Amino acid sequence: MSIRFRFTLLYTFILALTLTIFGLALYTIQSQDTLTSLKRDLSLGANKLADATLKTPGGQNFPEPPPDNGHTPPVPFNQFSSDQTFQAFPEREIARVLDPQGNLVASPFGREGDALPLSEEGLQALQSQQDWWETDTVSGEKMLIYSRPVIVDNEVEYIVQVARPLTERDRTLQSLATTLLIAGLLTVLVAFGIGWVFSGFTFSPIHRITQTAQTIGDERDFTRRVNYTGPQDEVGQLANTFNSMLSRLQDAFQKVEHSLEMQRNFVADVSHELRTPLTTLRGNLGLMRRDLPLEEKVDIVNDMVDESDRLIRLVNELLLLARADTGRSLAKEPLDVSIVLEETSRQAHQLDSQRQINLDVPSDLTILGDRDAFKQVALILLDNALKHSTGDINVTARLQGAQVEIRVQDFGEGIPADKLERVFDRFYRGDDTSTIPGFGLGLPIAKTLIEAQDGEIILETEVGRGSTVILRFHAMSIMIH
């Protein structure tokens, strides 16, 4: 059962319940109101008849009772009293006059069969000077009968009965009930149809969300969005939330795709880099099995040692890169830039003692970082500068506002603009580096370590004039303040 159908059923049920309560209340009010109106009319008629009875002398114009009956036979109203009330009594009402024992005394035509029903309980109540209401069937017609005593000198002189048929009232109430039932059923059916149509409009955005989600699941197209232009109600908020979720999923999916692409490229590059030294080692081992002169075997062994060292360096750099990729937590402690750069420059100078590394670093520059990671970055940058240039290397550091800026400048050939955007890609080495040792992992490692210390690395280059790597860190003195 769809939520649309359940919603329409709930709406229709509430409406039907409301109409039922309203119909019952209306029917009850109408029934009580008509009954009260009937009782009021009967009370007025009975009071008038009672007043007229009091004006009638006892026993006037009454025939003598038969010896075998014991009570006076009923007489017509025109014989019972000359009062105009008896002569002009409304035709819609039935009136009777009884004696205190409940015997019929007078009726419009004075017939014995004109007596109205009066129960023993009612007679006792009347004899106790209390009014009495009861409903009974007279000549096949339901009647409302009101009886009241006529009291003279604190004694019940007569009993006046006034009755009116309930047929018209019952017919009216039955017509009202039928009208309410038919109108209610028609209203519920129409309301169900209208509710079904409007709920379709209301839930159409949810249906579109469902279709969009199914399409995304089938096609893996996270660029799709739910097109919603309605009010910002609960459905509008759901559509906006779903679109926001799709945007985040799209970003996450693109990142995953990029990571997988980088992983595939990384595996391919690693395989390519490992294949050459391994192939060389395998070839040299094959040569060692031959009967070669001693000098050739020495050359082969030296070649194998060089290739083994190359493999070790590659594996070490890959391990360092893997640790950086895992987002391992680096120490955050005050670090004197000048001390680390002086130590690193001395170590780098040993790589090429013929080259000069010019260090211009004030002694009061302090950053918050990891000493080993910072030193590793500095060694990578100095090593790259020595490999890709033939002149001196300049290392400077300055306080620039709230940051410490470190520059490593060489005067080599520089990097063309079309290759500059790839210098931080793993294993990328350009076209003219076949004679330069390395694997293209230095700058990617440096970038990862710098960013892990909340720093920034920038490469500026000019073809024919050299390159400058710029490192920026938050100054420790600024952070303390």
Image: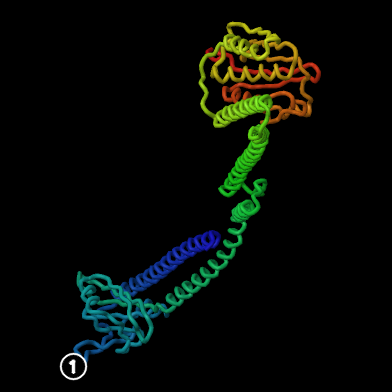
Q: How many residues crowd mark 1 within 10 Å: few (<14), some (14–19), many (20+)?
A: few
Q: Foreground residue, 350 or 180?
A: 350
On screen, residue 393 above or below 240 = above
From the top left corner, tell me how far across and down residue 464 is, in percent.
81, 18
On screen, residue 206 above or below 116 = above
Res. 348 in view = yes
From the top left corner, tell me how far across and down residue 211 is, in percent.
62, 55
Is 122 situated left or right of 76 in this image? left
Which image quadrant is residue 468 in? top right
The total number of labels drawn is 1
Q: Foreground residue, 58 or 185?
A: 185
Instruction: Say what amino acid the circle numbered 1 marks.
Output: Pro
Is 55 situated left or right of 382 in this image? left
Outermost residue, right direction? 464
Q: Indicate the colouring scheme.
A: rainbow
From the top left corner, tell me how far across and down residue 257 is, in percent.
64, 42
Q: Foreground residue, 111 or 199?
A: 199
On screen, residue 320 above or below 171 = above
Please name the residue that numbered disc 1 is placed on: 67
Which image quadrant is residue 273 in? top right
From the top left corner, tell me how far across and down residue 174 is, in percent.
45, 75
Q: Secondary structure at mark 1?
A: loop
Q: Foreground residue, 452 or 90?
A: 452
Res. 229 in view = no
Outermost residue, top direction? 363
